[in-house]
């Protein structure tokens, strides 16, 4: 496999100077790790500063203490914290290190809202904490397909769709709100009506109420991983179709190429319709609103659909 070298990433403990960073207007993000063992081919977080992203996971061992200190300093006006924007907070390293768990404990203790983006069923380990913060937390599973073979090809270090959906069921039946983020939707690979229907219907059957979606954004390094992978997997036709869609008709945005407007509009409309037909809700219940006036960040059921989504920043 071309984009990582070792069978498993090595773990490097580090000490961070700060961990809480502005994310979207008024929002905060915390990344307990740099790098990720899930090793998704299309990952957006493989920035230049995250050296050996797939082979070396750097763990910010002092993240919980730093976070607690930053919470104390910032007082009660803390917007919801997103875990995480540039890594998976429940990747394999977390099973042993429990850094994310300790950060979530701090959120619960301080009454701060939080939302978690993950591809891992390990999140279930912390159900006890989420249960104590039902009104101010949201668990978002990133799930791009329920085709297990395709998922393994694209996300070789991530758990199966089956494991993820089983975790979703347990969380939702305990009263914790669960969403599925279908992102990235990869044109010609995971965007067919049948594939989306299977994903949405299974997620609904596992208690998922909220959905969101975004098509693949291409960046040079992403294409150097994805292109050869498709070729080697005997999907040269998909590769050629992607080339035509993105490189001839796509929209350049900073370092990324987006699929053309008509593709994006029709994809969103199709997913919206499928979600509605299965009784789900398109859009995430995230709102930066204070508890007791302008106090700690809380998540309430107002929808952000139509606004800039969080994934524009992930
Ligand atoms: S789980 Fe997220 S952060 Fe980790 S490799 Fe996959 S896309 Fe990147």
Image (spheres, rainbow, N blue to C red):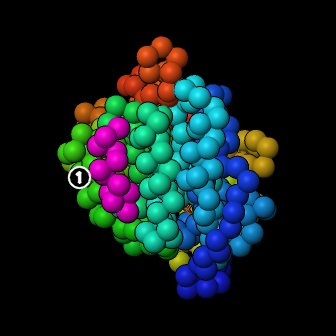
Judged left or right of residue 170, residue 140 is right
The residue positioned 26% from the left and 58% from the top of the image is 166
Residue at image point 68% right, 42% down: 21
Q: Position of residue 276 (x, y in %)?
A: 31, 32
167 vs 7: above or below:
above
Say whether residue 21 is visible: yes
Q: On screen, 270 above or below 215?
A: above
**Residue 230's spot in the image, x, y percent?**
58, 71
- What is the total number of numbered labels drawn onto the structure image? 1
Let me know if residue 129 is in the magenta part.
yes
**Residue 193 vertical placement versus 308 (above, below):** below
Which residue is located at x 66 percent, y 57 percent? 45
Residue beneath disc 1: 170
Q: Is mark 1 within 8 Å of ligand 1?
A: no
Q: Say which residue appears at 65% left-offset and 84% top-offset.
A: 5
**Whole-percent x, y for residue 189 in the image:** 49, 60
Q: Quadrant of the rendered structure where residue 111 is? A: top left
Q: Secondary structure at mark 1?
A: helix
Please, which residue is most extreme toward the top here?
293
- For the residue pair 214 and 29, the one nearer the viewer reads as 29
Q: Which residues are magenta?
A: 122-133
Q: Quadrant of the N terminus?
A: bottom right
């Amino acid at each position: 496999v071309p984009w990582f070298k070792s069978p498993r990433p090595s773990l490097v403990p580090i000490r961070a100077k700060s961990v809480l960073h502005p994310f979207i207007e008024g929002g905060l993000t915390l990344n307990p790790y740099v790098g990720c063992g899930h090793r998704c081919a299309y990952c957006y977080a493989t920035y230049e500063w995250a050296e050996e992203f797939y082979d070396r996971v750097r763990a910010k061992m002092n993240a919980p203490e730093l976070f607690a200190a930053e919470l104390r300093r910032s007082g009660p006006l803390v917007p919801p914290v997103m875990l995480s924007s540039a890594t998976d907070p429940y990747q394999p390293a977390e099973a042993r290190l429990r850094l994310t768990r300790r950060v979530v404990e701090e959120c619960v203790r301080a009454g701060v809202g939080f939302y978690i983006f993950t591809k891992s069923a390990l999140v279930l380990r912390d159900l006890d904490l989420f249960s104590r913060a039902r009104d101010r937390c949201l668990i978002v599973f990133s799930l791009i397909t329920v085709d297990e073979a395709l998922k393994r090809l694209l996300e070789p270090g991530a758990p199966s769709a089956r494991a993820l959906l089983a975790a979703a069921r347990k969380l939702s039946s305990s009263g914790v709100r669960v969403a599925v983020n279908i992102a990235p939707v990869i044109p010609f690979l995971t965007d067919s009506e049948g594939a989306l229907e299977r994903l949405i219907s299974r997620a609904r059957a596992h208690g998922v109420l909220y959905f969101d979606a975004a098509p693949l954004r291409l960046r040079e390094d992403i294409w150097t991983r994805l292109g050869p992978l498709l070729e080697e997997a005997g999907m040269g036709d998909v590769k050629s179709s992607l080339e035509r869609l993105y490189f001839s008709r796509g929209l350049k945005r900073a370092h990324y190429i987006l699929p053309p407007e008509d593709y994006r509009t029709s994809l969103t409309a199709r997913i919206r319709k499928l979600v509605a037909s299965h009784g789900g809700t398109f859009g995430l219940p995230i709102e930066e609103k204070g508890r007791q006036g302008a106090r700690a960040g809380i998540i309430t059921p107002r929808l952000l659909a139509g606004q800039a989504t969080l994934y524009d920043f992930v």
